[in-house]
Image (tube, rainbow, N blue to C red):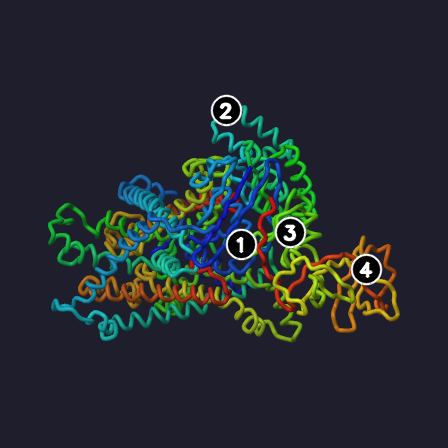
Amino acid sequence: MSAIGGVGPDLVGGGSLLQEIEEAGTPGPPVTRRRRRPRAWRLVILVIAGLFYAIPFLAAVKYSLIQNDGSFGFANYSAIISNGDVRNALYTSLEISAISAFVVIALMLPTVVLVRLRLPKLTLMLEGVTILPLVVPPIVIAAGLAHLQGSAPEWLVKLWFNHPLTGLTPTYVVLAMPFTYRAIDTGVRAIDLRTLVDASRSLGASWAATLVRVILPNVETAVLGAVFLTIAICMGEVVLSSIMLYNGVLPVEMIQIGAQSPGISVAISILGLVFVFLLLFSLSFIAGRRRGSNSVRVI
Amino acid sequence: MIRFEGIQRQYGSVRALAGLDLEIAEGELVALLGPSGCGKTTALRILGGFDHPTAGRVTVDGKDMTGVPANKRDMGMVFQAYSLFPNMDVRNNVAFGLRIRHEDKAKRLARADQLLELVGLTEHADRYPHQLSGGQQQRVAIARALAIEPKVLLLDEPLSALDARVRAQLRVEIRNLQQRLGITTLFVTHDQSEALSMADRVGVMNSGRLEQLDTPEQVYRHPATAFAAEFVGAMNRLPGRIGDAGDVQVLGQRLTVLNAEGHQPGSACEALVRPEAITIVRDAAGAGEVTQRTFLGASVRLEVLLDGGQKVLVEASSHDVGVGAGTRVGLRILTESVVVSDPGVAPDPEAVPAVA
Amino acid sequence: MAPFTVYVLIFLGLPLYEVIHGAFTSDADQLTLHNFSTIFSSSEYWIPLKNSLILSAWTAGLGAVLGTWLAAAVVATPPGSMLRRVVSSASGVLAYFGGVALAFMLIAAYGRPPGGVLTTWLKDIGIDLYAQGFNISSLFGVGIAYVFFQVPLMVILITPALEGLRPQWQEAAESLGASKLEYARHVAVPVMTPPFLGAVLVLFGNAFAAYATVLALVGVTVPLIPAAIEAAINGNVLVNQDRIAFALGVEMILVVSIVMVFYWMAQRRARRWLQ
C-alpha cells in the first residue's frame, strides 16, 4: 500500500468504500429536497483546487513526453513495453495484484458471510482484527518480515521469500484487509443474507454453490470495489517490496529507473493514476446503475 | 393577518405554484391539504422566507414581506423531522431563539422550562435530542418555535414522520395549544383527517392551484371540484347522464349538478358520491348484489356489484345493516346535489377563487 | 473461520511477533529494555521521531483545513453529477494509490530545473524557486507531497459529516432569528468539531506511517522514522541494527495506537450527533 501506511479512512462512519452506495438503496426518513442555487464561492474553490492538481499533472504529462534527445514523443511510454526490466516488473505486479485480489475475496467473503450468519458474536473481534493492519504500519510489518527472511530456515525461505509473488502476495492481502473487509461487509449488510441463504439451501444447494451462485452476484458491487481497491494497493505498494529487497515489482522498478530515466517513471505514474482513476470512476457508474440511485460515492 | 397575493413559483420548467391567493385571519388555523408536489410546502416556505416567489407577494398585517429574510420574519417553524440541534439539550434547544435575541441566561432558561411544561416534557429538559422519541422531538420543536412568541406559526407536515398513535395524540395537543394561544397558524399536510380535524379552514391544493378554501365540513360535503371531492374521503364514481336542466340521471335518481359548466346536456358523465351518502335495502329485484362485506368496527363497508358491472362502495353504521355477501339489494343516494366529471378521466382541476 | 484465523495468524501475527519480541530482547535473547533506552536517548533516533511528528502534524492540519473547504464546495453539488463522480474517484485515487505515482508527478512538475517543468517555466519568467532554497526532494518537499494526498483523504473523511448537517437545522435557526454566522457558531461548528478532529487524527496517523512517497521522492536518507527503520534493517550504516528497528517499530505502533484511541473517542461523539 503506497500512500496510506497508517490508519485508514474507513473507520469514520460512512466514509468507507461503497458504504454510501449500498446505503443509498435503503429508504430513509422523509427529507424534503431543498433546492440550492450554486454560489460563486463554491465554484471558485473547485476551480482553484482543480488547478492545483491539474497543473502538476499536465506538467508531468509534458515531462513524460520529452524523450531522451529532447524532442517530443511517446518513447517513454513505449519503453514500458520495450524495456525488459519495466515490462517484467509490470507483469509481476499485475500478477501479484490479481492473485491478491482473488485471495482477498476467497478469504474475506466466506468469513464475513459466516460471521454474519452463524457467529454474530465474533463480529467485533473480526472488526478488531481487520483494523490491526492499520495500527501496525506496513513499514513495521516489513521489518518483521525482513527479519524472518533473514533468520528463517532454508526450506521456508525457498518456499516463501524467494520470489516476490510468494513473498509479497500474502502480506498484501493482509494490508488490503481493512479496506476490503469494510467494502464486503457493507455489501453483505445491504442484502438480506439470511433469507437468501435459507432459500438457496432449502432448494438443495450446497454451501459452495450458495456462496458462488447466490451470494456473490448480489454483492458484486461491493466485491468489485474490494477487488479494485486491492489492485490499487498492490500496484502502488512500495514500502514492503523495497524493504524486502524485491526489485522486480513495478513501483520499486519505477524508483530505480527514476534515477537514470525519470521520464519512464513519470510515464508509468501518469498511466497508473489514470488507470486507477478509470477503475474507480467506472465503479461509480456500475454501482449507481445497479441500485438505480443517484449515489456515486466510490470511496 | 396574512395575505398571499397572486403567488407564483417557477423552477425552470416546473410550475410549483400557479397563482395562489389566500388570506389567513388573525388567530386562525388554515390547513393546506394536497398530494405531494401540489405546492403546499412551497407556499409555506415562501411565507416563512425560505423560498421566494417568481411573481406576486406576501403581506403580513399589511406589510410586504418581499425581500425580508427568514430570520427577520418573526415566524416560528416546525419541520417534519430532525430539526432539533443535536449539540444542545432540550432546554437549550427551546431557549435558542431567546438566546439569539440576547435574553439573559436565567430568563431564557426559565421561559424554556415554561414551554416544556406546556408541551408536557418537563422531566426531559436535560436530555439530548437523540435520546428522545419522534413524538417527543416534535413536541420540543413546537415548544422551541413558540418560545419566541412569534406572530405566525408554520407547521410543515409535523406529524407525517410519526407513528399513528402518537400522531392522533399530537394532533389534538397542537390544536388545543394553538387555540389557547390564539396564534395564527399555517399547517401543511397530505393527511386529510388531520386537516379536517384540526383546521378552521382547509385549502385543498392540486398542481400549484388552490381548488377550494372553506371550512372542513363544507369541503367534505360540498367539494367544489372533482379533485377536491376525490382527494378528501372515499368516493364513488357512478355513471350517469346529464339532463337538460343542470341535473344528472344516476342510479335511477335525478340529482342537481354542482359543476354544470363544461358538461353538455345529454352527455355521459360520472357522478361523485360518497359511500356514506348511499343507503341500501334488501330487495330481491334490486339493482345489485353485495359482493363483499368488511367490518370496520363502528361502520361496515359493503361492496355492491350492479348488474351493469359497476362497483359501488357503501358505508353504513354496523347497527343498521344486516346484509351479508350474496344478498340482492337496492340502492338509494341520499344527497340531492353532486359533482360530476368526465367519464374515465382523472379529476379535472378547476381552480376556484379563494373563499375569503 | 479457520482458514481466516490461520492466515491472519501467520501473515500478520508472525511478523508482528518478530517485531515485538525482537524489540524487547537483547542479542543474547534476554528480556531487556535496552533497545528502547537507546532510541529514546540518542539524538540519532530522537530527530527522526521529532521530524515525523512535526511533519505529520502540519500536513494533517493544512490538509484538514483545505480539505474541509474543498469538501464544502463539493457537497453543494448535486449527487449524481459528473463533477461529483470525478471528484469522488479522483479523491480515491490520490488517497489510496498516491504514493509513488504522486511523487513522480511532483518531481516532473517541481523538480530542480531543467528537470521540473513548472520550476523551469517559473525560472524563465524570473522566479527561481530552487535558488530560494526550495527543493522537492527534501523534508519540506515530502510535506508538500503529503498535503497533496491529505487533502483528498480529508475530503473523503469529512464529506459524510458535512452531508450530515441537515438543512433543517439552518432553517430552524433562521426561523428563530439567527443569522448564518450565528447558526455556524452555535450549531454547525460544534456539531462538526468531533468529526473534524477525528479526521485530523486519521490524517496525522496516515502521514506518520507513510513511507512510499518518501522513498520515491528522497530515499532512505531523509530523517524520518520509517527511513530510520529501513536503514536499521538493511544495514546501510551499521549492521545488525535489527533490534533498534524493532524498537522503533514498537514506538510507531504506540504512536498510532494513541492516535486511534483519541480517534475512537471523537467518533463516538460524532456518531451520536450526526445520526
Residue position marked by numbered label 4 in the rendering: B279
Residue C252 appears at what percent x and percent y? 37, 47
Separation of residues labelled 3 and 2 (CA atoms): 41 Å
Residue B58 appears at what percent x and percent y? 49, 42
Disc 1 residue type (three-letter)? Gly
Identify the mark at residue C76; answer none if there is no mark: none
Residue A172 sits in quarter: bottom left
Nearer the observer, disc 3 or disc 2? Answer: 3
Residue C272 appears at what percent x and percent y? 53, 44
Disc 3 packing (10 Å; few <14; some 14–19; many ≥20): some
Q: Earlier in the sequence, mark 1 or mark 3?
A: 3
- Determine the secondary structure under disc 1: loop
Separation of residues labelled 1 and 3 (CA atoms): 18 Å
Q: Nearer the viewer, residue A177 or B168?
A: B168
Q: Are marks 2 and 4 in contact (CB under 8 Å)?
A: no
A271 on left or right of B101: left
Q: Earlier in the sequence, mark 1 or mark 4?
A: 1
In this rendering, do the residues under marks 1 and 4 share a single chain?
A: yes
Disc 4 residue type (three-letter)? Thr
Q: Residue at x 34, y 41 (%)?
A: C37
Nearer the observer, disc 2 or disc 4? Answer: 4
Identify the mark at residue B208; answer none if there is no mark: 1
Q: Nearer the viewer, residue A81 or C44?
A: A81
Residue B300 sits in quarter: bottom right
